Structures are given as C-alpha cells and as structure tokens.
Image: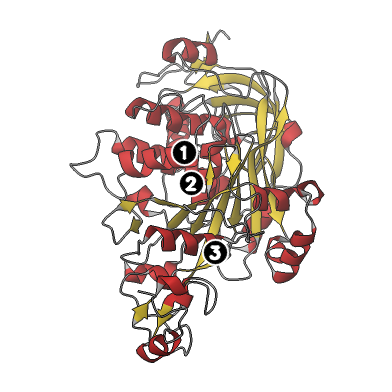
Amino acid sequence: MNIVKQPAIKNETQTIRPLSVDEVCALEKCSPPLLTIGNRIVWLSDNGPEFGYIKWLGKLPDVGPDWMAGVHFDNPVGSGTGIYNDYQLFDAPVYHASLVPVIGLLRAEDFTGDPPPSSALSSSLVAAVITNNIGNENSSSSSNRNNTISDRSKQYDASRITCDIPPLSTHDDLKYLCGKARGIQGHHNSCYLDATLFAMFSYTTIFESLLHRPQSSSDIAEYSEVQKVLKEEIVNPLRANLYVSADRVMHLRTLLEKLTSVRGLTSEEKDPEEFLNLLLNQILKADPYLKLSSGLESYFYQLFVDKDEKLVLPTVQQLFDQSFLASDFKLREIPPCLLLQMPRFGRQFKMYPRIVPSLYLDISDVLDNSPRQCSICGELAEFECKECFGQFGEGLDSTAFCQKCLDKSHAHKKRAKHKTTKLNIPTEFILCIETSHYVAFVKCGSGPDAPWCFFDSMADRNGEQDGYNIPEVTLFQNLRWWLSDEGTALLLTTKDDKLLPEMTRRLLCDAYMCMYQSPDLMMYR
C-alpha cells in the first residue's frame, strides 16, 4: 500500500512516517501478522462488539514495535478519518476510523458470543484501541493528536501490558475464559509451549517470581528482555484479554532459539521439559524446585518404576511411592512446586495404558527426617523397613514403625530378617500428549471443589496451508467424578478407550506431566 502524504499541517515537531506491512517485512525480514487487509474483524469493546474491515496494516515507529491495523468500523467509535502524523493511511468516513493493535482484534467468523463485561475485559486492558483524535480535522492540533495516541498505546497496548495482572481466580473468570479464540493461539508446532504457558500462568501463582526477579550480574544480558516478553506480551494479555496471538509466542520462541544452543524452537516439535529447562534453568535461572537427599537438585522428577502387572489402573500416588522406594531418595525439603513426569518414554511408549491422576499427593513419607506415623498403631514412627512395603497398608507409610510395633511385627519368622503427619499437596495442572500434540488440563481456582478446564491451542483451524489455528478452552465438568471411586469402577469395566468421552480419554491415556503445589507449603521453603 502506498502511503500518501497529505498537505502539511503546521507542526513544530518532526513527524515519523508510519511503515506499511510490506515495508516492515522487507526491513525486518519478518513474517506479516496473521490478519490481512480486507479481513472482517471484531473488536470487543466495553460497550459490546464493534465490527469492521482492516484497511491498513503496518507499524508506527513512534509508538512501538507491535503490528497495528487501520480499521474502518461499521459504527462510529472514535473521531478519526484514517490520517496519522499527517499521512493518509486509509480512507474512512469521519468517526469510523481507528488504529488498533492487531492483538486486540478477532476475525469476525471466530467471534461466537457476547463479550465479557467491563470488569473482566476493560478498555484499559483489552482493547488498547487507539481511537482518540486520529485524523480528526476538528482537533486542536496535530501535536495533541499524536501525543494522545502515543501515550495511550504505551500504557494500554493490549499486546504489551506493563502493569501487574493477577492470575484468574473466580468462576466468573472461567465463564469468560471458556470458548473459542481463548487461551494461546498455536502456530508452527508451538503446542508444547502453548499448553505449558497456559497451565503455568492462567490460574496458579507459583511461577510469579519468574516475572518479577530483578536482573543480577550473573544473568545473561538478555535476561530482562526475555522476562519482559514473557510477562508483558504473553502472561498479562492472557490474564487480561484471555487471548494471546501466535506472533507474541513466536517472539519468545525466537528469543529462546537465539539465546540457546537448541535449534528448531521456532518450527519443530519439542517437549515441555525442553522448554522449561531453557526458561527456568538457562535463561531465568530459577531456584530448583526439587532438592533430593542425594544432593541432586532439579526442576522435574521422572517417575522410574518397574511395571507391576497387578496394577491395572495405577494412580500417580502409587507410581510416586514406588519410584521413591526404588530410588532410595528422600526429599530434603517440601518442594514449592513438584513437576512429575509420567513413566513414558518418547511420544509413543507408555508403561501403563492408563494412569489416574491423584488430585492430592501425599509426600509425608518421602520427606527426609520428617515425622511419620507407625503403620500399625499410629504413634510416632522411629524406624523404616522397606521389606515391609505393602504388608501393613498401602503406600510408603506401610514401611514406618514405632519401636514396639517394629519388634512385634518382626518377631514373625517371615519378617525376622528384614534389615506421620500427612502432607497432601494438590495438583494444579496436567499436561497430556497424543500423536505429538500437547494439551493441558488446568484447575481453575483453589480448594477441593475448584472446577477444571481443558485447553487446546490448535482446537480448530480456519483455512488450509495459509490458514490459522483457533485455540479453545472448555469446561471439564466431570473430571472429579471420573477420578472418584465410582468413576474408577466404571473405568475398570470399560476396557476400550474409544468408549470413553474424549476429554476423559485424553486425561487418563495421555498424561505426560503433573504439577503439584500448594501456597500453604511455601512457609517451609
């Protein structure tokens, strides 16, 4: 598109020319945004959805690095005519033209319902629509016009929100979060990252320190840049707008590929632990969440177990107990965050066809030097006998004895040669994989009755090779029932996975990583 210079309007300050989409792509050697000129779009304003057509695409160098769209709205929305800095970007009747950050727009065909009220999606967070005095011939001066635009965009640009936005927390939040064009948009094999980021930052607060730790002398030079992109372009828009476009995620992927030795981060399939290792360990240098009695420290714990043929439908708790029993490790302290990788190797091999996620994980018996209950009388335990595992109950608590019960139980010839207070931490999210595609189940709030949602960054698609993915968040109403005794009984009689509801099947058959944490346990750290 050729930008026409209008007759000069007197202005003492030198104006900076807007750049069209073709100019930006040529100068920056980048891809254009997913929206294109001519697209029918909708902007979710405080007063309801506003529809229009994109008439111009490009960037405003004096405003910021984000893609902007010149929109001809159907209804009056501002006071513009398509002129910016004395340049005619596009033609539109007065009051119908606005410059809007691309991230604040949805394709009209993707819009399926009413917008959230202003309490959930306020104009200061969601829209960042730059409507004030764009090309308004009645405004007092060109200088005032440009200052208004610049100031609003820097403070409220929907694609770069600088203020602190808390995680979602209420049932009302979930009501607006569910639907199409919600969550993080997938693009070019980004599902490993989309699902992980959505799970980490939509509802839980455990990873907030990653967004706020100041840069230190030991950090890489680009530390603040990565942190800023993560917080202002992904986490904050997710929480405020309930949507993050693929180009924002691509910005983070490009930075990670540039700063690390891992290739293919912008185009190839990766695993969540690869991404988390880069982000937590190499870039942001978070303290390891897991500290073992062996001296090892890590961000994850891989469940290594020998397959037990008697376990038809194992729970995460059972696999957790078995893994720690076999490893001879203990936890040196209560982990603020426990990321458990299920016993599966690669994208295909699964040790168990189904694994039941434990909504609460009892870590009492794997804490080093922690008080434990005798498995027989319930008094304070002083001894542990691994050979007694499973003989006086289930799980690792069956190995703990007081002196009296140890002597009595081991007086039996079968056990003659054998050389607590509960700490339950709740699960917060579960990452799943099926045929190289990652999705997430996320607990939406705190407490035992908190609802759960299912997120897929590529749930739907518009178009073929040149199309785009549409993310979706869905309420999973029956998750707790399927994990109850009644649900487990039905699972045991339903052998064919294809007979299970889709979300239930994906939860039980495709579990890849579970995250457990509780804010109440942070006091122990």
- Categorize mark 3 by other alpha carbons within 10 Å: few (<14), some (14-19), many (20+): some
Q: Callout 1: helix, strand or loop?
A: helix
Frontmost of labels 3 and 1 is 3
Marks 1 and 2 close (CB-CB < 8 Å): yes
Q: Quadrant of residue 255?
A: top left
Q: Which mark is residue 88?
A: none
Foreground: 489 or 100? Answer: 489
Q: Quadrant of residue 337?
A: bottom left
Alpha carbon separation for disc pair 1 and 2: 7 Å
Q: Amino acid at mark 2?
A: Asn
Vertical side of 373 occupied by 266: above or below: above
Q: Position of residue 494 (x, y in %)?
A: 79, 56
Q: Callout 3: helix, strand or loop?
A: helix
Which residue sits at x=63%, y=46%?
A: 510
- Categorize mark 2 by other alpha carbons within 10 Å: few (<14), some (14-19), many (20+): many
Quarter of the figure with the C terminus: bottom left
Q: Which mark is residue 233?
A: 1
**Is 146 left, or right, of 13 in this rendering?**
right
Q: Identify the residue under disc 2.
A: 236
Taking the view exactly as shown, the residue that stands out farthest to the right is: 499
Q: Is residue 477 visible?
A: yes
Q: Callout 2: helix, strand or loop?
A: helix
Frontmost of labels 3 and 2 is 3
Vertical side of 451 occupied by 88: above or below: above
Q: Is residue 75 visible?
A: no
Q: Amino acid at mark 1?
A: Glu
Q: Which mark is residue 318?
A: 3
